[in-house]
Image (cartoon, helix red, strand yellow):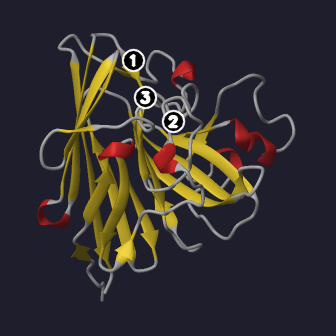
Amino acid sequence: MVTAATAVPLRAAYDAAHGGRWTSLRGGGREWLWRGPEPGRHEVRPDDAFVDAGGLEECLPTVRGRPDHGEVWSRPWRTAGPGTAVIERPTFVLTRRITDSAGVVVADYRLAADPGHRFVWAAHALLNLSPSARLDAPAGTPTRLHPEAAALLPPGTWPTDAPWLGGAWPAPAGLTLDTFGTDDGTALGAVLLDCPRVQVIDGVDRLTLALECADQPRSTALWRNLGGWPETGPYRSIGVEPMLGAAFDLADAGPTDAAVVPPAGEVAWRLTISAHRIP
């Protein structure tokens, strides 16, 4: 007999004054968002180094590169109605509205910019997971490993000066990525291409993240830090990050690796997050 999963209502909270950061994603007595050890998040000013406080950070127009984790995480957003916040920059305006109708959290985004404007966006969600948790995505999904993975591969495996190395999920280049396990001193990032929906499985709990956006590249980024970063005072953090684009760094993005604003001058997308539990 197969036991059906039951829906677990979720509620989200965010801090518009501090980069629009999501501070909580809670349901069924469980907090899904991890909180980091780094102090000083509330004192951050534009162009400061990234402070890894946990939660979910909005990364735009890049994740890695300059500025690190993008322009919007370090700036105050303007409240524009219930659940709605806006961040205005010289080259774009981003509006986000978060609702939790029927216990499913929905975040609707709209970016206005000049036609042809290129960007990468990621919902940089750091999750509070046990060592037995795993990430479920379609087997065979093309996956890009980023350069920190080179140290985990046999000598000579990494192509010279390449920004990434491709392979198939769940074990690109032979590195098993779908299980998290105990801390082993490694840290690596990967991007699952054309993968707009994934599920995190942790014991009896399931967290599903789905990204909808027409005519733009949709991916899921993974940050699997098992006590390998930073060099001084490393800790554990797991990021599962719905993404528009296919590269962490906008500077590395080829013609099809970034989102591009169409002639209408706007891109709209929706992130849906739901939870279930096996009784």
Q: Residue at x 50, y 41 (%)?
A: 44
**Tag 1: Cα neighbours inside 10 Å, few (<14), some, or many (≥20)?**
some
Q: Earlier in the sequence, mark 1 or mark 2?
A: 2
Estimate the x, y position of residue 163 in percent, counting from the top left: 65, 27
* Residue at the spot of label 2: 69
* Residue at the spot of label 1: 118
Residue 140 visible in the snapshot: no
* Residue at the spot of label 3: 120
Question: Which image quarter: residue 146?
Answer: top right
Tell me the quarter of the image containing the N terminus. Answer: bottom left
Estimate the x, y position of residue 274 in percent, counting from the top left: 27, 62
Which amino acid, by three-letter code, is at mark 2? His
Estimate the x, y position of residue 133 in percent, counting from the top left: 52, 70
Question: Considering the numbered disc 2 on the image, is that residue within a helix, a strand or a loop?
Answer: loop
Question: Considering the numbered disc 3 on the image, is that residue within a helix, a strand or a loop?
Answer: loop
Question: Considering the numbered disc 1 on the image, is that residue within a helix, a strand or a loop?
Answer: strand
Instruction: Decide which of 40, 151 is in the foreground and name it.
Output: 40
